[in-house]
Image (cartoon, rainbow, N blue to C red):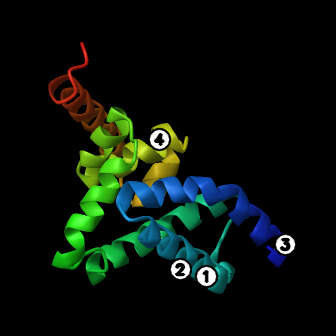
Amino acid sequence: MNKKQFTTQVLEAEKSLYHIAKSILKNDEDCADAMQNAVLHAYEKLHTLRNERYFKTWLTRILINECNHIIRSGKESVPYEDYFETQESSQQEDYSEVFEAVTKLDSTYRIPLVLFYVEGFSIKEICRILNLSQGTVKTRLYRSRKLLKEKLVGEYGYDE
């Protein structure tokens, strides 16, 4: 894969990468950092990609690792003084109830849900991205739908 092909495929996957990063990280700046680091690492390790057909899957796995690294590094923490300012500005954003319910799911269930329903990855691709068995991915998707339904019916008053 040459530089032009790499750039083209990264640009095609940009929106998808943002959605995935946003499902893991809450802060837009952290999402941008994770995406930027993932693209940089992917470019540096491009020679390790075995099959160009799986480029997006490979890049998504790198992005998830970067997001987890940001979470582990504690970059997500906000100083106490800034907490109330962030709360006020985040309340002004208009998110749908479904989006809010999805963000409240544990990452174990949220990530497969976003990969499958929002980004359109197949179950086999999700297995490769998350290094899980097909049964585990299917179970997590089932449980995430069930938890999402409970949240929407309970907290937001949707009818069953």
What is the spatial separation of the Cα atoms under label 3 and label 2, in whole angstroms? 19 Å
Q: Amino acid at mark 3?
A: Lys
Q: Is residue 74 left or right of residue 47?
A: left
Labels 1 and 3: the sequence-earlier one: 3
What is the spatial separation of the Cα atoms under label 2 and label 4, in whole angstroms? 23 Å
Check whether the beta carbons of the residues at disc 2 and disc 4 lie within 8 A of each other: no
Residue located 38% across and 47% down the image = 112
Q: Amino acid at mark 4?
A: Phe
Instruction: Check disc 2 and report the residue beneath it.
Output: 37
Instruction: Check disc 4 and report the residue beneath it.
Output: 116
Residue that extends furthest to the top in the rendered view of this protein: 159
Residue 134 sits in quarter: top left
Mark number, residue 75: none
Instruction: Check disc 1 and report the residue beneath it.
Output: 40
Q: Is residue 128 above or below residue 75?
A: above
What is the spatial separation of the Cα atoms under label 1 and label 3, in whole angstroms? 15 Å
Check whether the beta carbons of the residues at disc 1 and disc 4 lie within 8 A of each other: no
Q: Dot 4 lies on which element? A: helix
Foreground mark, 3 or 2, reads 2
What is the spatial separation of the Cα atoms under label 1 and label 4, in whole angstroms? 25 Å
Q: Dot 1 lies on which element? A: helix
Q: Is residue 46 left or right of residue 62?
A: right
Q: Amino acid at mark 1?
A: Leu
Mark number, residue 4: 3
